[in-house]
Amino acid sequence: MAQPSLQPTGYQLSANYPNPFNSSTWIEYSVPYQSSVTLKVMDVLGRELATLVSGERGAGRHRVEWNAGRSPSGVYFYRLVARPLSGVQLKEYSETQKLILLK
């Protein structure tokens, strides 16, 4: 019987956990190839509040924590943008998801 592959077969941005959250939450994403990755948190007006990831990441699942600090309760968005670095003819991937901060 074949073993399941631990390497992702595609890009994916997972729902943050916990959501809603108080003070901090975890965001998980997957990249199938060595990629240039940015992960940012924005308010409902699109203003950038935090850059959680900016740089190259290897293939696999990655997890990052966002500490909301002094941000007020409300709805926020997080956006992943990823681009394969070499040898793969894929377009840029981007996905946005919503998170809710309750204090």
Image (cartoon, helix red, strand yellow):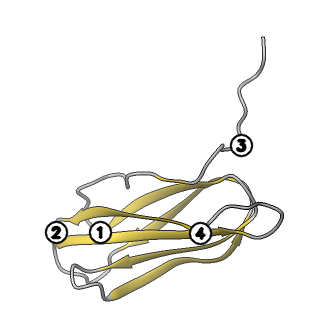
Disc 4 target residue: 92
* C-beta proximity under 8 Å, tags 1 and 2: yes
Q: Position of residue 84 (x, y in %)?
A: 71, 66
Disc 2 target residue: 103
Which quarter of the figure has residue 53? bottom right
| Nearest to the observer: residue 79 or residue 65 | 79
Cα separation, mark 1 vs mark 2, equals: 7 Å
- Pair 4/2: label in front: 4
* Between discs 4 and 2, the one toward the N terminus: 4
In this image, 76 relative to 29: left or right?
left
Q: What residue type is labelled 3?
A: Gln
Q: Where is residue 25 in the image (x, y as percent from the top left)?
A: 37, 61
| Crowd tier of the residue under label 1, counting other residues whose Cα lies within 10 Å: few below 14, some 14–19, many 20 or above | some
Furthest toward the top, the residue is: 1
* Between discs 3 and 4, the one toward the N terminus: 3
Disc 1 target residue: 23
Which quarter of the figure has residue 63? bottom right
* C-beta proximity under 8 Å, tags 3 and 4: no
